Each structure stands twice: as structure tokens, then as C-alpha cells.
């Protein structure tokens, strides 16, 4: 084994081979790496075999690495604190290099630090030639040396939007996603784009290790294999991409980043269900513009209808004027309420796609327990959610425009009453606590 002096660079490397660097002071690790390459007949040539220094790489070391221009660097993580810093120096100094780490089992915090430092793959102990070979094969796919189109999907993206907090969008999306997966057996992902106060993970009873902003920060090196490490699996078989734990960090995400990530997710899943909550910020708009259908989740109260009416021009722009991409779902529907389904259709100019009954006690119990309703049996509300998922799976059409009102009676009544009284009109339905 040579020190970091470049003397082991093999002359005459075949251009069809990937150039590899091995950084390790452990003979057993070195043996496993070479065996993994030879047994798998991988087109990788280890041209530099390096003993890592006792300190992070200096500029001379990095210049020699850059001169060799490796496709892949295999780094043995013997001392996590030191060697993760070495990984960061390599990623910054030789940015086109794929980094593979080998070493001890890392806790979630250190694993996240390692990925942020630049490791695209990490193989924990106990190391075997098979495990190392699998990681290197994934690197080859990332480098384009093997066809990676196999398994790629052209999934449907379903966006769920609420005009007002408490409308029940998160409850609907979690239960519909689980039931879609159960009905179709297709690969399904729930994405929480309420980047400030998203609650999908809580509704699902999931404790995520990573979140959406972690994925954004590593998008420059993201592919299907790395993506899997950011996704949580629910016992139902549905996958979850959580909102960030700290509300303030969601502000750093741009609409362009969201669009790129959603494109990647659609290539890996059959169904991608996105909860935008009540936001019309750039991340939510990016999802709305790329969604196949947009489910508008609303209650039959005047503030919800007023907000939804105000949002319609933006939604119309997001769908390029295609009404079939809008699906109006009335949650907590009450036949005896002040506002009827006919009223909402006349007010908004689109037909109601689906209604869900008002079952506050059942829903709030489910949310508090982190157990989605469709997994618990046959409540009326659960059955209505299952039927909605079945309707979606069958490919039912979206909204149809109804004749536009000459006068929007409800909202005009509401505005005139508000201006006279200086207060919001409240009906009996508003006294029931909202369930999200």
C-alpha cells in the first residue's frame, strides 16, 4: 500500500474503465474492495491506493486527486470525525467524483453529516464483497455506465390544496394515499410541502430521520439510490417524505428546486400525492402547476368559499385554464348547513367532485393516535375516503364548468353583512372544531 504520492497510478488505463481511488489504511478493507471489483467483473481500475493522512487533505493532496480525475473515490471511514471532513474536502475539491464510504454503522446524525459532506453511498460494517459491489454498481449507474432507465416510471402527481386551515387536507391525503396503494399495489409516495407546519408524518405515526429540505440541499447529487435514504416507509406500504422539523428552514426552498424534485419523484413512483396545505408560495405553486389533478379541499363555510373564490384565478393560471385538472372535494359536508352544494357550485363555477361527511370525533381520534382511518375499519368517514380513492384509481374525470353566476349571491351577502356589522357571520357549522 502506498502513501499519498501518486506512485501507484497505473499507466495505460483503458478509457472504457472507471478510474477509482481507494483511501484506506486497513488491509482487510482493501482486500474486500479489490475482491468486490474482481468478483463482479466491474469496469473499475483502482489507480490510486492511498493511506489517509492524520489530518484533512491539504491543497497538494487535492491537486493530485484532481490531476488523476477519478470517477469514484472509495473512502474507508475509520475515524468518523476526521474522515467525514476528508470526504467534504474531496467533494469540494474534486466535485465530479462519486464518493463511496465504507465503515462502522453510523447514527442518523453522523450519516446525515456524511451525506452532506458529499458521500453518495455508504456501506456499513460488517463489510462484504457483495455489499461493496452493490454500492459500486449503483455508482456506475449514476455515472451512466449502465442503463438506468430500467424501473423508471411516469407517475401521476396529485396535489391537495386547502383555501383555509383546518379544512382536512392532510387527513384526506394520508388516507387516500394508503387506500390507493392498497387498491392498485402501485408504488405510492406522500410528500409534505407544508414546509412550515406540515403534519403528514404525525398523522401517519411516522418518526422521520430526514426531511424535504435535506433532500433539496443534496439535489445536486440526487438519484434514485440516494433518494431512497430520505424516504420513510409506513407499515401500509406507502412512503413518506416529511416536512422539515424546523419551520424556519422551509424558506430557503425555491419553486425551481421543487419542480426538479417532483420530476425526480414522478420518475420513481406511480403515485405522488403532495399536500400543499393552504399555501400559494412558490413551492406550492410549483406543485400545482405540475399536478395532473388538483384536489381542492374545502368546508361549507363562508370564509372557506371566499378564500377559494379568491384563489381561483391563480389556480386557473396553474392549470392553464383546464377545468378537468380541478377536483372540488367538500369535507365535513352538512345537508342542513347554511351553504348547499348548489350554492358552492354556483359560487365557484365548477361542480363538486366528492363529498365527505362531518365525523369530527372519529377523525380527531385517528389524528391523535397517528393511525389513519382506512386502516381501522368501517366508519362512515373511512368508507367515504376509500370510495374517493377508488374513484381516483379508476381514472375518473375532473371538474366540469357550470354556468357562471350572474351575481355571486353568497359572497355579496357576506360582504354586505360584514360591512354593516363589522363582524364575520358565523353559522352553526363553524362551531364544530375543524379537523386537519
Image (cartoon, grey):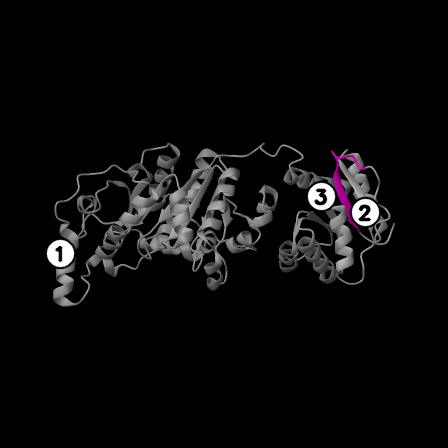
Going 23% across and 41% down the picture, which residue do you hit? 350
User: Considering only vertical position in the picture, is 234 above or below 303?
Assistant: above
The percent position of residue 413, horizontal first and vertical second, equals: 13, 56
The percent position of residue 258, horizontal first and vertical second, equals: 47, 49
Going 64% across and 58% down the picture, which residue do you hit? 113
Callouts 3 and 2 close, C-beta under 8 Å: no
Q: Earlier in the sequence, mark 1 or mark 2?
A: 2
Viewer-closest of 238 and 306: 306
Q: Earlier in the sequence, mark 1 or mark 3?
A: 3
The percent position of residue 170, horizontal first and vertical second, equals: 39, 51
> Which residue was labeled with disc 1?
413
Q: Is residue 377 visible?
A: no
- State the residue lying farthest toward the bottom: 422
Mark-to-mark CA distance, 1 and 2: 78 Å
Mark-to-mark CA distance, 1 and 3: 68 Å
Callouts 1 and 3 close, C-beta under 8 Å: no
Highlighted magenta segment, given as a residue range = 13-23
SS state under label 2: strand
Q: Which mark is residue 48?
A: 2
Q: Which mark is residue 75?
A: none
Going 54% across and 52% down the picture, which residue do you hit? 215
Mark-to-mark CA distance, 3 and 2: 12 Å
Question: Residue 424: which quarter of the image?
Answer: bottom left
Picture mark count: 3
> Which residue was labeled with disc 3?
71
Number of the front mark, 1 or 3:
3
SS state under label 1: helix
Amino acid at each position: 500500500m502506498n502513501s499519498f504520492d501518486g506512485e501507484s497510478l497505473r499507466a495505460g488505463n483503458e478509457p472504457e474503465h472507471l478510474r477509482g481511488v481507494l483511501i484506506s489504511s486497513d488491509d482487510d478493507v482493501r482486500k474486500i474492495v479489490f475482491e468486490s471489483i474482481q468478483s463482479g467483473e466491474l469496469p473499475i481500475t483502482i489507480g490510486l491506493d492511498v493511506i489517509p493522512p492524520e489530518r484533512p487533505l491539504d491543497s497538494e493532496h487535492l491537486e493530485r486527486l484532481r490531476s488523476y480525475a477519478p470517477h469514484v473515490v472509495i473512502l474507508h471511514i475509520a475515524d468518523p470525525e476526521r474522515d467525514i471532513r476528508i470526504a467534504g474536502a474531496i467533494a469540494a475539491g474534486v466535485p465530479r467524483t462519486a464518493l463511496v464510504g465504507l465503515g462502522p454503522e453510523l447514527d442518523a446524525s453522523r450519516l446525515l453529516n456524511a451525506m452532506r459532506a458529499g458521500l453518495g453511498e455508504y456501506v456499513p460494517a460488517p463489510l462484504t464483497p457483495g455489499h461493496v459491489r452493490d454500492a459500486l454498481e449503483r455508482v456506475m449507474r449514476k455515472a451512466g455506465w449502465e442503463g438506468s432507465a430500467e424501473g423508471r416510471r411516469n407517475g401521476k402527481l396529485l396535489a391537495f390544496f386547502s383555501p383555509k386551515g383546518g379544512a382536512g387536507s392532510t387527513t384526506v391525503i394520508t388516507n387516500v394515499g394508503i387506500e390507493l396503494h392498497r387498491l392498485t399495489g402501485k408504488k405510492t409516495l406522500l410528500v409534505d410541502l407544508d414546509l412550515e407546519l406540515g403534519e403528514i408524518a404525525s398523522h401517519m405515526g411516522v418518526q422521520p430521520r430526514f426531511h424535504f429540505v435535506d433532500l433539496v440541499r443534496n439535489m445536486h447529487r440526487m438519484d434514485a439510490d440516494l433518494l431512497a435514504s430520505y424516504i420513510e416507509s409506513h407499515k401500509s406500504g406507502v412512503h413518506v417524505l416529511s416536512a422539515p422539523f424546523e419551520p424556519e428552514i422551509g424558506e430557503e426552498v425555491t419553486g425551481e428546486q421543487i419542480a426538479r424534485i417532483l420530476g425526480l419523484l414522478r420518475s420513481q413512483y406511480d403515485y405522488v400525492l403532495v399536500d400543499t396545505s393552504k399555501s400559494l408560495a412558490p413551492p406550492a405553486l410549483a406543485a400545482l402547476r405540475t399536478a395532473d389533478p388538483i384536489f381542492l379541499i374545502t368546508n361549507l363555510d363562508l370564509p372557506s368559499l371566499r378564500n377559494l373564490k379568491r384563489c381561483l384565478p391563480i389556480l386557473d393560471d396553474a392549470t392553464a385554464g383546464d377545468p378537468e385538472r380541478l377536483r372540488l372535494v367538500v369535507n365535513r359536508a352538512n345537508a342542513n348547513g347554511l351553504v348547499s352544494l348548489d350554492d358552492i357550485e354556483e359560487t365557484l363555477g365548477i361542480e363538486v367532485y366528492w363529498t365527505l361527511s362531518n365525523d369530527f370525533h372519529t377523525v380527531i381520534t385517528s389524528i391523535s393516535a397517528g393511525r389513519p382511518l382506512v386502516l381501522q375499519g368501517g366508519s362512515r368517514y373511512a368508507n367515504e375516503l376509500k370510495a374517493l380513492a377508488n374513484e381516483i384509481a379508476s381514472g375518473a374525470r375532473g371538474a366540469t364548468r357550470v354556468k357562471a353566476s350572474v351575481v355571486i349571491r353568497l359572497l355579496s351577502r357576506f360582504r354586505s353583512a360584514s360591512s354593516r356589522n363589522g363582524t364575520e357571520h358565523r353559522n352553526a357549522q363553524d362551531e364544530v372544531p375543524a379537523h386537519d
